[in-house]
Image (cartoon, rainbow, N blue to C red):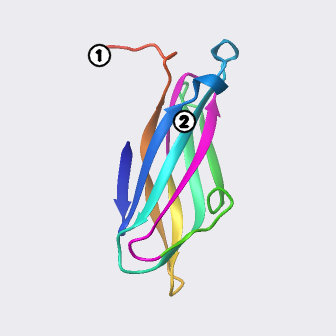
Protein backbone atom coordinates (compact mmCIF):
# COMPACT_ATOMS: atom_id res chain seq x y z
CA UNK A 1 0.00 0.00 0.00
CA UNK A 2 1.21 3.50 -0.84
CA UNK A 3 0.13 6.70 0.94
CA UNK A 4 0.72 10.47 0.76
CA UNK A 5 -0.79 13.37 2.69
CA UNK A 6 -0.98 16.90 1.27
CA UNK A 7 -2.85 19.77 2.97
CA UNK A 8 -4.66 17.31 5.31
CA UNK A 9 -5.90 15.12 2.43
CA UNK A 10 -4.53 11.57 2.62
CA UNK A 11 -4.48 9.46 -0.56
CA UNK A 12 -3.82 5.73 -0.23
CA UNK A 13 -3.41 3.44 -3.23
CA UNK A 14 -3.25 -0.35 -3.44
CA UNK A 15 -2.44 -1.81 -6.89
CA UNK A 16 -3.30 -5.38 -7.90
CA UNK A 17 -2.07 -7.23 -10.98
CA UNK A 18 -4.98 -8.78 -12.93
CA UNK A 19 -3.62 -12.02 -14.33
CA UNK A 20 -7.03 -13.05 -15.70
CA UNK A 21 -7.23 -9.90 -17.86
CA UNK A 22 -3.58 -9.94 -18.96
CA UNK A 23 -2.12 -11.74 -21.97
CA UNK A 24 1.68 -11.65 -21.66
CA UNK A 25 2.12 -13.34 -25.06
CA UNK A 26 0.49 -10.23 -26.59
CA UNK A 27 2.37 -7.76 -24.35
CA UNK A 28 -0.86 -6.85 -22.55
CA UNK A 29 -0.65 -6.45 -18.76
CA UNK A 30 -3.50 -5.06 -16.65
CA UNK A 31 -3.65 -3.68 -13.10
CA UNK A 32 -6.48 -2.49 -10.90
CA UNK A 33 -5.82 0.06 -8.21
CA UNK A 34 -7.97 0.85 -5.19
CA UNK A 35 -7.80 4.50 -4.11
CA UNK A 36 -8.94 5.93 -0.78
CA UNK A 37 -9.10 9.72 -0.33
CA UNK A 38 -9.49 10.87 3.28
CA UNK A 39 -10.14 14.40 4.51
CA UNK A 40 -8.22 14.68 7.78
CA UNK A 41 -8.56 18.48 7.85
CA UNK A 42 -11.15 20.95 9.09
CA UNK A 43 -12.52 22.22 5.74
CA UNK A 44 -14.92 20.53 3.33
CA UNK A 45 -13.23 19.89 -0.02
CA UNK A 46 -14.30 18.74 -3.47
CA UNK A 47 -12.20 16.78 -5.96
CA UNK A 48 -12.33 18.76 -9.21
CA UNK A 49 -9.74 17.23 -11.59
CA UNK A 50 -7.23 14.40 -11.81
CA UNK A 51 -3.89 14.08 -13.56
CA UNK A 52 -2.14 10.70 -13.78
CA UNK A 53 1.37 10.07 -15.09
CA UNK A 54 1.88 6.43 -16.12
CA UNK A 55 5.38 5.25 -17.02
CA UNK A 56 5.99 1.80 -18.47
CA UNK A 57 9.16 -0.28 -18.15
CA UNK A 58 10.55 1.23 -21.38
CA UNK A 59 10.24 4.77 -19.97
CA UNK A 60 7.27 5.73 -22.14
CA UNK A 61 5.02 8.20 -20.34
CA UNK A 62 1.28 8.61 -20.74
CA UNK A 63 -0.64 11.44 -19.06
CA UNK A 64 -4.32 11.03 -18.27
CA UNK A 65 -6.23 14.16 -17.27
CA UNK A 66 -9.89 14.75 -16.64
CA UNK A 67 -12.68 15.95 -14.42
CA UNK A 68 -13.19 14.06 -11.17
CA UNK A 69 -12.66 10.35 -10.77
CA UNK A 70 -14.79 7.45 -12.10
CA UNK A 71 -17.40 9.95 -13.28
CA UNK A 72 -17.73 11.68 -9.90
CA UNK A 73 -16.47 14.83 -8.21
CA UNK A 74 -16.75 13.73 -4.59
CA UNK A 75 -17.16 16.27 -1.82
CA UNK A 76 -15.57 15.34 1.49
CA UNK A 77 -16.48 16.93 4.80
CA UNK A 78 -13.91 16.74 7.61
CA UNK A 79 -13.44 13.08 8.59
CA UNK A 80 -15.08 11.70 5.45
CA UNK A 81 -13.47 9.47 2.84
CA UNK A 82 -14.16 8.36 -0.72
CA UNK A 83 -12.99 5.09 -2.27
CA UNK A 84 -12.94 3.94 -5.85
CA UNK A 85 -11.32 1.34 -8.07
CA UNK A 86 -9.89 1.93 -11.51
CA UNK A 87 -7.33 0.25 -13.72
CA UNK A 88 -4.68 0.62 -16.36
CA UNK A 89 -3.14 -1.57 -19.06
CA UNK A 90 0.51 -1.52 -20.10
CA UNK A 91 2.45 -3.18 -22.90
CA UNK A 92 5.30 -3.94 -20.48
CA UNK A 93 5.18 -6.24 -17.42
CA UNK A 94 5.90 -3.40 -15.00
CA UNK A 95 5.62 0.33 -14.59
CA UNK A 96 4.94 3.13 -12.18
CA UNK A 97 2.05 5.54 -11.65
CA UNK A 98 1.78 8.83 -9.81
CA UNK A 99 -0.34 11.90 -10.08
CA UNK A 100 -2.27 14.75 -8.55
CA UNK A 101 -5.82 15.73 -7.70
CA UNK A 102 -7.00 19.32 -7.93
CA UNK A 103 -9.22 20.06 -4.95
CA UNK A 104 -11.42 23.02 -4.09
CA UNK A 105 -12.53 24.21 -0.66
CA UNK A 106 -15.90 25.82 0.18
CA UNK A 107 -14.53 29.34 -0.42
CA UNK A 108 -13.50 28.42 -3.98
CA UNK A 109 -9.77 28.16 -3.33
CA UNK A 110 -8.21 25.42 -5.45
CA UNK A 111 -5.12 23.46 -4.48
CA UNK A 112 -3.24 20.39 -5.69
CA UNK A 113 -2.64 17.24 -3.66
CA UNK A 114 -0.27 14.39 -4.43
CA UNK A 115 -1.21 10.86 -5.40
CA UNK A 116 1.72 8.73 -4.17
CA UNK A 117 3.94 7.04 -6.73
CA UNK A 118 3.19 3.33 -6.81
CA UNK A 119 4.74 0.38 -8.55
CA UNK A 120 2.93 -1.78 -11.10
CA UNK A 121 4.57 -5.20 -10.84
CA UNK A 122 3.58 -8.43 -12.53
CA UNK A 123 4.89 -11.95 -12.02
CA UNK A 124 6.16 -11.74 -15.62
CA UNK A 125 8.76 -9.06 -14.82
CA UNK A 126 12.31 -10.38 -14.56
CA UNK A 127 13.84 -9.60 -11.19
CA UNK A 128 17.29 -8.00 -11.05
CA UNK A 129 19.56 -8.06 -8.02
CA UNK A 130 21.68 -4.98 -7.53
Viewer-proximal residue among 43 and 129? 43
The tag earlier along the polypeptide, 1 or 2, is: 2
Task: Sort mark 1 into few (<14), some (14-19) or many (20+) by Cα contacts within 10 Å.
Answer: few
- Image coords of residue 57 (percent x, y): 52, 25
96 is within the stretch colored magenta: yes
Residue 91, placed above or below residue 110: above
Query: Does residue 128 show up magenta in the picture?
Result: no
20 relative to 107 in the view: left or right: right
At horizontal 62% and vertical 38% (from top left) the residue drawn is: 88
Vertical arrangement, residue 127 with respect to residue 55, above or below: above
The x and y percentages for residue 28 are: 66, 23
Q: State whether the magenta stretch is mostly helix, strand or loop.
A: strand
Q: Which residue is mark 1?
A: 130
**Where 81 falls versus 92 (above or below)?**
below
Residue 20, compared with residue 11, is above or below; it is above
The segment highlighted magenta reads 77-98
**Residue 85 at x, y percent in the picture:** 57, 48
Residue 91 visible at all: no
Could you tell me residue 47's position as x and y percent? Answer: 55, 68
- Foreground: 95 or 83? 83
Question: Could you tell me which quadrant the C terminus lies in?
Answer: top left
* Residue at the disc numbered 2: 55
Amino acid sequence: MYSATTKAIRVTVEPTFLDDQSTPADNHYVWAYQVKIENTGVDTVKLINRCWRITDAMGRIQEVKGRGVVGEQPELAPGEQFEYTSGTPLITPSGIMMGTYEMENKTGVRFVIDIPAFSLDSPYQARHLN
